[in-house]
Amino acid sequence: MSHAPGTRRSHSRMPLVAAARGESPARRPVWFMRQAGRSLPEYRAIRAEIGMLESCFDPDLVCEITLQPVRRHDVDAAILFSDIVVPLKAAGVDLDIVAGTGPVIAAPIRSTADVESLPRLDPAAVGAVARAVTKILVQLDEATALIGFAGAPFTLASYLIEGGPSRNYVHTKALMRDDPDTWHALMARLADITITFLQVQLDAGVDAVQVFDSWAGALSEADYRTFVAPHVDRVFAELAEYGVPRIHFGVGTGELLAAMAEPADVIGVDWRVPLEEAVHRVGPGKAVQGNLDPTVLFAGPAVVEREIRRVLDDGRRAVAAGAIGHIVNLGHGVLPDTDPDVLTRAVELIHTL
Ligand code: CP3
C-alpha cells in the first residue's frame, strides 16, 4: 500500500487498534515489546557494523530493523526501532547506550542549574525518525499497526539523575523529596521532550503510541500520584487530539495500575498481576495489554502452549470483567537470548487458538 506523509492510514482493518477501541478485532492482536532487536540474527548482522544510537538516526536502518520482526513473526504491530534516550541525544544531552548496560549519561543532573541547562527538543533534530516512519508505512501491510513510543518523564529522569541504570534510584528519590520545585521543573521539561518526540511520530503517521514508564514501579502509589502523574497526564492529554490508541506501560507497577490507566486507552500489565485482577484495580473501559512472563519462552513447547492458553483465558475473563479489549504481549521485553522461532510459534498459536 502507499502512504502519503502526514496522512493517517485507515485503522478499520487493524486488529490492534480494534482491540484498543473496544471493537471486534478480526483476530486476537499480538506483538512483543523489544521484538525489534537482539533476539534476531538479522538484527545482529546490521548492528555488527554500526553503533546503537547511530542506527537510530539512520532512516533506512530504522525502517529495516522495525520490519524484521513483522516479516518473521506475523505480529499485528511493528514497534518503531529507536530508544527512550533518542530524543535526549537529539536535544544535545551527552549520553551513550553501552551494550549490556544501557543508557549512560556523561554529566548526571543533580541541581537546579543542571535542570535549567537541560536542552529543549527541536522537532527538526528528530527529523530522521519522522523520515523512518514514512518509509516504514509505505511497506507495512494495512492490517499491521505501527506503534511509536517514548520514555515517560520519570524513567527518563531516573537515567539523567543516576547517570545510568539503577537499582534503588537513591539520587532520583532524594531530589524528588528534598527539592520538589526542581523535581517538578525537570519533569515538566522531560514531559515537553516526550510530547514533542511523540508528536513528530504521530505527525508522520504512527497508528498508536506507547509510553514506557519502565521504572515507575519503584514508587509508592502516593509518590507516583504526587510527583509523576501530573506530568504523565499532561503527556497523554496533549496526544488525545490524534485519536490513536495510547498505551501506558511499566514494570512492577501492580500498585500503580489504577493511576497509570487513568490518562491512557490501554494499560500494559506485567506478568505479576493477572489480567482479570488488573481490571479490578483499574476499573472498566480500558483495554489491557500483556502479560506472558518473558522467561516462559525459555521453557519447553508444552509449557509455552499452556502459558499462552492461560493468558488468552485470563484475557477473556478480563473482558468479561469490564476491559474493552485484550492485546497479547509479554509482561516486559523479549530477552536477548530468546529463540526467535519460539516467538514465531507463539504468534501462530495465539492466532489459531
Ligand atoms: O523492539 C522494540 O521494542 C523497539 C526498540 C526499543 C529499544 N529500546 C531498542 C534497544 C524500545 C521500545 C526501547 C525502549 C527502552 N529503552 C526502554 C523501555 C522498555 C523497557 O525495556 O522497559 C528502556 C528502559 C530503554 C533503555 C535501554 N536501552 C536499555 C535498558 C537497554 C538495554 C541495555 C542492554 O544492552 O542490556 C537499551 C539498549 C537497547 N535499546 C537495545 C535495543 C535493541 C540493545 C542495544 C544493542 O543491540 O546493543
Image (tube, rainbow, N blue to C red):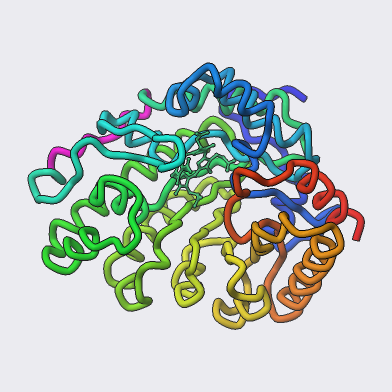
How would you classify the magenta stretch by its main secondary structure? loop
- Whether 96 is drawn above or below 328: the answer is above
Q: Is residue 45 left or right of residue 171?
A: right
Residue 12, horizontal then vertical, whole percent: 77, 46
* Placement of 328 over or under 128, stated as above or below: below
Q: Name the side, left or right, on which 91 lies relative to 267.
A: left
Q: Is residue 121 magenta?
A: yes
Q: In the image, what residue occupies the spot 38% across and 39% down?
A: 85
Q: Is residue 200 above or below residue 59?
A: below
**In the rendered image, the vertical position of residue 32 relative to residue 266, given as above or below:** above
Q: Which quadrant of the rendered structure holds the C terminus?
A: bottom right
Q: Position of residue 216 (x, y in %)?
A: 40, 63
User: Total number of numbered labels?
Assistant: 0
Could you tell me residue 170's position as x and y percent? 23, 63
Q: Nearer the viewer, residue 159 or 280?
A: 159
Q: Where the N terminus falls, by quadrant?
A: top right
- Give the left or right position of residue 71, taking residue 150 as reference: right
Q: Nearer the viewer, residue 1 or 257?
A: 257
Does residue 122 appear to the left or right of 79 in the view shown? left
At 59% across and 24% down in the image, what residue appears? 134
Residue shown at 59% from the left, 49% from the top: 244
Could you tell me which residue is drawn at 58 percent across and 57 percent down?
332
Tell which residue pokes out farthest to the right in this image: 352
Residue 213 quadrant:
bottom left
Magenta residues (range): 116-124
Residue 229 falls within the magenta-colored stretch: no
